[in-house]
Image (cartoon, rainbow, N blue to C red):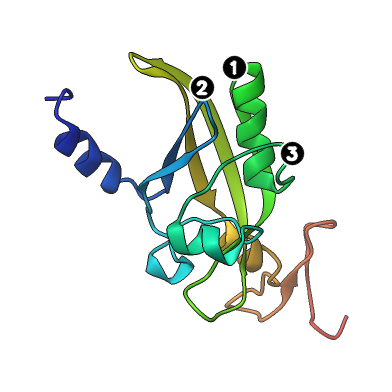
C-alpha cells in the first residue's frame, strides 16, 4: 500500500499542516498545502523574484536567503540532523497582493531514500494562536480581568 505514490500523496493531503520535501540541491517540492489554502499562493518565500514565483521554482541556499524557512532547511541539509525554528516567515501571496507574514514552527528532518538525500519539512501555522494569545482573559461571570501575576481577578479600571 505504501509503495503506491498516489496513496502516499493522498495521505499527505489529509494532514492539516503543509509538508514539503527538499532535495540535496535545495529544490523545494510542495507535497501538501495543509490548512494554508490557496490564498497564500502555495508556499513560496516572499524574498523570491517574480520570475521564480511564477515558475514556482524555489531553491534553498544559505547564501540566497536568511529567512526562517531557508535557514532551517539549509541547516538540516548541511548538518544532516533535525532542525527546528519558530518565528515570523513571509510568504508570497495570491497575485497582486502584499507578502503575508505568518508565525510558524518549521521542522526539517533529513531522510535518505533510494534516489538520494532529502529533507522532509513540516510547517505549523501558529499565526492565529499568537494573535489570540495577546487578548485579555475576561471572566464571563464578573467581567473582571484575570491577573496572571497575582492570580486574582481585577476590575478593568484597575
Reading the image, the residue beneath label 1 is 80
Q: Is residue 139 left or right of residue 1?
A: right
- Asked if labels 1 and 3 touch by Cβ distance under 8 angstroms, the answer is no
Q: CA distance from mark 3 to mark 1?
A: 18 Å
What is the number of the mark on residue 63?
3
Residue 62 lies in what quarter of the image? top right
Alpha-carbon span between mark 1 and mark 2: 6 Å
Mark 3 falls on what kind of element? loop
Mark 1 in CB contact with mark 2 (< 8 angstroms): yes
Which label sits in the foreground, 3 or 2? 3
Give how far across and how far down residue 71 sits, in percent: 69, 38
The quarter in which the N terminus is drawn is top left
Pointer 3 or 2: first along the chain: 3
- Residue 14, compared with residue 101, is above or below; it is above
In front here: 111 or 84?
A: 111
Please report the residue visible at 85 percent of the width from the left and 86 percent of the height from the top. 157
Q: Quadrant of the C terminus?
A: bottom right
Label 1's element?
loop
Find the distance from the CA under tag 3 to the CA under tag 2: 20 Å
Q: Which residue is mark 2?
A: 110
Task: Choose between 82 and 29: the one closer to the eye.
Answer: 29
Q: Residue at 46% across / 64% down in the picture? A: 54
Q: Residues within 10 Å of mark 1 (few under 14, many from 20)?
A: some
Q: Is residue 151 above or below residue 15?
A: below
Q: Is residue 84 visible?
A: no
Amino acid at each position: 500500500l505504501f509503495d503506491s505514490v498516489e496513496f502516499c500523496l493522498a495521505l499527505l493531503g489529509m494532514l492539516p499542516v503543509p509538508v514539503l520535501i527538499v532535495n540535496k540541491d535545495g529544490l523545494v517540492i510542495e507535497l501538501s498545502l495543509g490548512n494554508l489554502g490557496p490564498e497564500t499562493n502555495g508556499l513560496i518565500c516572499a524574498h523570491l523574484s517574480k520570475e521564480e514565483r511564477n515558475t514556482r521554482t524555489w531553491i534553498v541556499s544559505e547564501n540566497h536567503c536568511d529567512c526562517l524557512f531557508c535557514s532551517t532547511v539549509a541547516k538540516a541539509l548541511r548538518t544532516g540532523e533535525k532542525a527546528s525554528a519558530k518565528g515570523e516567515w513571509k510568504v508570497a501571496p495570491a497575485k497582486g497582493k502584499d507578502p503575508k507574514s505568518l508565525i510558524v514552527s518549521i521542522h526539517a528532518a533529513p531522510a535518505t531514500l533510494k534516489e538520494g538525500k532529502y529533507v522532509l519539512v513540516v510547517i505549523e501555522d501558529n499565526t492565529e494562536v499568537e494573535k489570540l494569545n495577546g487578548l485579555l482573559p475576561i471572566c464571563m461571570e464578573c467581567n473582571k480581568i484575570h491577573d496572571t501575576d497575582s492570580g486574582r481577578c481585577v476590575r478593568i479600571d484597575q
